[in-house]
Image: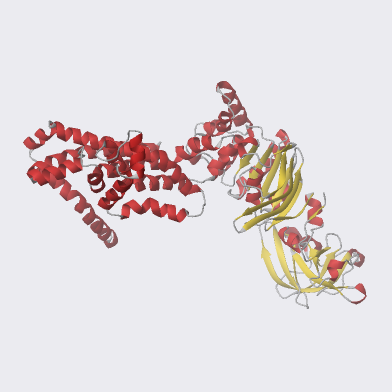
Amino acid sequence: MSNFKVVMWGLGAVLLLIVVVPLLRMILAADPTVLKAAVTDSEVIGSILLTLRCALWATLVCALFGIPLAYMLARWHFPGKGLVQGVIDLPVMIPHTAAGIALLMVYGRAFLVGKAFASIGLSFVGTEAGISLAMAFVSLPFLVNAAREGFLSFDPRLERVARTLGASPWKAFFRVSMSLSWRSILSGGIMMWARGISEFGAVIVLAYHPMTAPVLIWERFESYGLKYARPVAVLLILLCLIIFAVLRGIAAKRKEA
Amino acid sequence: MLRLRDVSVPLGDFRLKEISLHVKDGEYMVLLGPTGTGKTVLLETIAGMHRIKSGSIFIHDRDATRLPPEKRNLGVVYQDYALFPHLTVRKNIAFGLQMKGERGSRIVEAVERMADFLDIGGILNRRPANLSGGERQRVALARALVLEPYVLLLDEPLSALDRSTRDRLRRELKMIHRKLGVTIVHITHDLTEAFFLADHLAVMKDGSILQQGIPENVLKRPANRVVAELLGIENLIAGTIGENDGYVTPLGPLDIPIVPSASMKSPTGFCLTIPGWCVEVLPGKERAQYAWMGNMTVTGINNTEGQVELELVHTSGEQLRTFLSRREAAALPVSLEKGREVPVAIQREGVHWVPSTDHPSSDG
């Protein structure tokens, strides 16, 4: 192996170890008895399921609004396009606790939008809807950017040809554009979902209860210490790893197909 | 029938300028122009992909100016064929039929009939990524033709192919046109392709059509210097009207009958267009058959696959290019070499005077 390759591999490996070592250490150091207790702890399981569910809702709702936005960004030229792209990337840059406070100031019960939603029975403070909203806010760049890249990855003339072959704009969008960018969108969805699951800062401001897994881990760490927080964390990590491996596998198969 | 009347399309810094075209039923129209001249934009405008600022488009006697692409019943084949990469050849060809609401056995029959016609029956279950350039082109043609379009629009369909495949497919395009009688608008920058295929030729540059008409007529009488250059006419010599309405060129007086016009007397003057085949080395005919005779010096001898290109220079500094077949070059009584002075003549036939400006023109 050339010196160039050795150096590149060595530098890359350092970064991988920074990620892998703490996760392995935590999984391997978990006390099986406590881990078993965590698996049968209804509060833990309920919290993990809540987290997965809220992140999934956030991803699905964002897909409904985010895929059209991504398509517009990929295909159309319009005034302020750069600004719109900047707004999409904004949640990545701002502290998530600040994002939570910003959301609270719009969707809180004392504020106009919050009041409007409350009038139709939808509240965002201390509810699953609030958790999903916080997750969506901080993780939507992953989905929108991946979908945009997906739409950019193929020649737009394919859509034009579809139109000349009799497809309406909607048929061309679903039969050509979505079919060709589906893998990128799925990949972005997985990343968005994953990011939503791990969200703590924005969620804790908008909805401390019901407790998502990251909030429960924090709460147990604060109240009982590391020994009781770790099994919940290990369980969440293991579950996420399995789900992500399966979804990544599906995405990869779609690419090969 | 396809008719464009004064169609203008602004597209960023580019603009199609008052394009007027008339393509008759069953006609093979070729739009010839250099890269970046707006040929593809014009084709996409006909297909309904760009908003027209002014003018009108009639397809099959119906005003299609505001019709969306899916309502125009036109087939489009792009340079790289734009086949759907996620669909098999069969599904690519069936796509348009499905969009138009055809179902089941009618789609199967139509696809197989078209596949047989274009000899692609053996690749129906393959994906575009696994096809050769020639196969892709046939699939793209099949996908468009299966819908029996009013007009087939071809966007440089041969330019992405190697030479032998291109030559073969050029003949096949002619065969398809003859057998199906489909109206075709074909854009290209390739002169050979244009003259091989065209019933009607339009020459484009910078978003405008400079001249259109029967190819032979356009070639014989280019409307101006720009058209002559685009048609690949080898020699263009600037000229002016001298005293007593005599024609002054760097080569001296030329014996070509012409009535001086106002444009020739303009400060921009005019041009003498001399195709390479009009320039004879060691002329054998009577003096009266030539517009000009004199001596020139050989400055370059370039061999191409079928002929020899000669570069000649006059004592005035004016240069001419001509071509000899290898047989003609070998039969010359003197050997051609750089620096040798040889008698040269310019045949009357094929030489024309054109204005230097680029006013559009049509011979109908």
| Image position of A78 (left or right of A107) | right
Give whichever of A1, B265 is nearer the camera: B265
* Marker count (numbered): 0
Please tell me which residue is depicted at 49% across the width and 35% down the height of the picture: A175
| Image position of B123 (left or right of B113) | left
Residue A80 at x, y percent in the picture:
48, 55
Residue B207 at x, y percent in the picture:
68, 56
Say above or below: B94 vs B320. above
Give whichever of A185, B221 is nearer the camera: A185
| Image position of B182 (left or right of B97) | right
Q: In which quarter of the image is residue B189?
A: bottom right
Q: How was this image coloured?
A: secondary structure
Say above or below: B196 vs B251. above
Give whichever of A95, B180 is nearer the camera: A95
Give whichever of A238, A61 is nearer the camera: A61
Q: Quadrant of the N terminus of chain B?
A: top right
Residue A98 at x, y percent in the picture:
27, 52
Say above or below: B299 vs A179. below
Please tell me which residue is depicted at 53% across the width and 31% down the height of the picture: B90
Q: Is residue B265 visible?
A: yes
Residue B128 at x, y percent in the picture:
51, 39
Q: In which quarter of the image is residue A112?
A: top left
Q: Can residue B168 be seen in this view?
A: no
Please tell me which residue is depicted at 76% across the width and 66% down the height of the picture: B236
**Farthest top residue?**
B105
